């Protein structure tokens, strides 16, 4: 196996419109840089995959499709082998082109800058490929906490007993014959929302974890972060009394990042397993059905800001008034050394689905949400039935869709992951 890596600074200028919360404004200061990283993975049979990790809320499908087409033309890597993932930092710029309230504030120049960075990073990572031995391991780290109230109205409050897939996945691409990592790809799960709606540009806790791990690895080594399924998981910045959350500080996300990095280091030192150098990949396209689709005139009369913004956005996107009945979706899977996997899922996937994907693969797996598109919140069937922030229709409107996801979307995603896994196991 050969692996190469490249890192590009994509920190936007102060003044750019920020994303992640309604009513944001321009960034006023930069706390720490935002990065875009590319990892080129070449299997023993010559198969090549490109993984991109960026300190952005996510990538929209239009960007992903354009980037994949350009990368295939430039590098010869097939679309199903290209993964584009966002850390989901809420201290970053507006970027997704179908957030109803943010579309008017998108910076086309910045989007082009990131697009160019993807192509540049790919070329550099491919040129950087060197022989490595693959090792992998799993750990546990609770930098966050379940944020769904366990009973109606399922508000956003600390729920320490709520489900939290706190798996930390680690891929260590080591110098041949050693356990010295050249590139470490790690995966953990928690919303990067420590700073709340402050107008500060930052990679939040994933950036802090990456910096701490890179400092431990030393010069010439690279740490790359892939966000997990944190749709209902947020930082453990709990207000006094434990009944609500408080706005955090950079000191809070530095502490969280250090905790995650320490667990990755423990895995690197004590829990690695060797794997062969083979690489396989595949992707399955889905249509996630929508339900409770209303009409634009009703949406225009709503008292909700987001619903009215959606009506304006939808009238422009679908001028004939025919609204979509499904959301395009993709489940992408990589298997390395026949021993460890990476599954990429678009959107704000809740933690229960991430754990379900890991279960159906039957092997240690890094599940990377916010990948290859940012369609919406992706709730489990239970959360969809309950409603609340992650399960309600309102979040689909924020993301530019006219209805709520049908409860069987969870089954469709798990069946797709299991199907891809079956193909790999049968030699397909």
Image (spheres, rainbow, N blue to C red):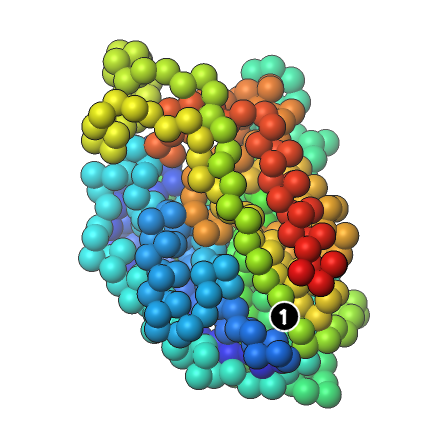
Residue 256 in view: no
Q: Which of 347 and 44 is in front in this view?
A: 44
Q: Which residue is drawn at 44% across and 31% down?
A: 326
Residue 123 in view: yes
In the depicted structure, whether residue 273 falls above or below residue 330:
below
Instruction: From the viewer's perspective, tell me whether residue 280 is left or right of residue 89.
Output: right
Task: Look at the image and tell me in which quarter the N terminus lies.
Answer: bottom right
Horizontal and vertical percent position of residue 200: 34, 50
Task: Look at the image and tell me in which quarter the C terminus lies.
Answer: bottom right
Horizontal and vertical percent position of residue 40: 50, 73
Horizontal and vertical percent position of residue 160: 69, 33
Horizontal and vertical percent position of residue 166: 69, 47
Query: Residue 277 lies in what quarter of the image?
Result: bottom right
Q: Say few, some or many: other residues with alpha carbon within 10 Å of mark 1 (under 14 / 14 to 19 / 20 or more).
A: many
Q: Which residue is drawn at 46% across and 65% down?
A: 78
Secondary structure state at the residue bearing disc 1: strand
Q: Which of 28 and 368 is in front in this view?
A: 368
Q: Residue at x 60, y 28 (%)?
A: 408
Q: Which of 353 and 20 is in front in this view?
A: 353
In the depicted structure, whether residue 171 falls above or below residue 125:
above
* Number of marks in the rendered image: 1
Q: Residue at x 21, y 28 (%)?
A: 319
Identify the residue position indicated by label 1 in the image: 279
Instruction: From the viewer's perspective, tell me whether residue 34 is left or right of residue 415.
Output: left
């Amino acid at each position: 196996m050969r692996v190469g890596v490249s890192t590009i600074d994509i920190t936007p200028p102060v003044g750019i419109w920020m994303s992640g919360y309604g009513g944001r404004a321009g960034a006023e200061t930069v706390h720490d840089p935002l990065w875009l990283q590319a990892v080129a993975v070449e299997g023993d049979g010559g198969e090549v995959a490109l993984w991109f990790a960026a300190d952005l809320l996510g990538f929209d499908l239009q960007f992903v499709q354009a980037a994949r087409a350009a990368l295939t033309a430039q590098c010869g890597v097939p679309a199903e082998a290209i993964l584009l993932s966002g850390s989901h930092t809420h201290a970053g710029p507006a970027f997704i082109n179908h957030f109803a309230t943010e579309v008017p504030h998108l910076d086309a120049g910045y989007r082009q800058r990131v697009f160019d960075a993807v192509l540049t990073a790919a070329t550099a990572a491919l040129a950087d490929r060197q022989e490595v031995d693959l090792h992998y391991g799993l750990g546990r780290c609770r930098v966050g906490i379940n944020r769904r109230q366990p009973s109606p109205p399922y508000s956003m409050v600390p729920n320490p007993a709520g489900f939290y897939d706190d798996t930390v996945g680690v891929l260590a691409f080591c110098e041949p014959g050693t356990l010295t990592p050249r590139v470490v790809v790690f995966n953990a799960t928690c919303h990067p929302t420590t700073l709340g709606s402050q107008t500060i540009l930052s990679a939040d806790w994933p950036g802090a974890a990456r910096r701490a791990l890179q400092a431990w690895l030393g010069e010439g080594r690279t740490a790359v972060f892939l966000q997990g399924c944190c749709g209902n998981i947020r930082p453990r910045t709990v207000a006094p009394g434990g009944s609500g959350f408080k706005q955090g500080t950079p000191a809070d996300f530095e502490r969280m990042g250090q905790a995650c990095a320490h667990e990755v280091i423990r895995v690197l030192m004590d829990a690695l397993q060797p794997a062969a150098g083979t690489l396989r990949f595949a992707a399955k396209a889905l249509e996630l059905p929508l339900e409770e689709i209303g009409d634009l005139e009703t949406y225009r009369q709503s008292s909700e800001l987001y619903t009215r913004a959606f009506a304006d956005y939808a009238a422009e996107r679908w001028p004939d008034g025919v609204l979509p009945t499904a959301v395009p979706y993709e489940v992408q899977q990589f298997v390395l050394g026949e021993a460890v996997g990476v599954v990429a899922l678009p959107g704000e996937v809740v933690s229960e689905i991430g754990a379900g994907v890991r279960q159906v693969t039957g092997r240690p797996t890094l599940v990377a949400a916010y990948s290859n598109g940012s369609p919406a919140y992706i709730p489990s069937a239970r959360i969809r039935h309950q409603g609340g922030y992650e399960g309600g229709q309102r979040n689909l409107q924020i993301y530019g869709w006219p209805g709520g996801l049908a409860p069987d979307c969870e089954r469709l995603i798990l069946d797709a992951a299991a199907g891809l896994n079956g193909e790999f196991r049968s030699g397909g």
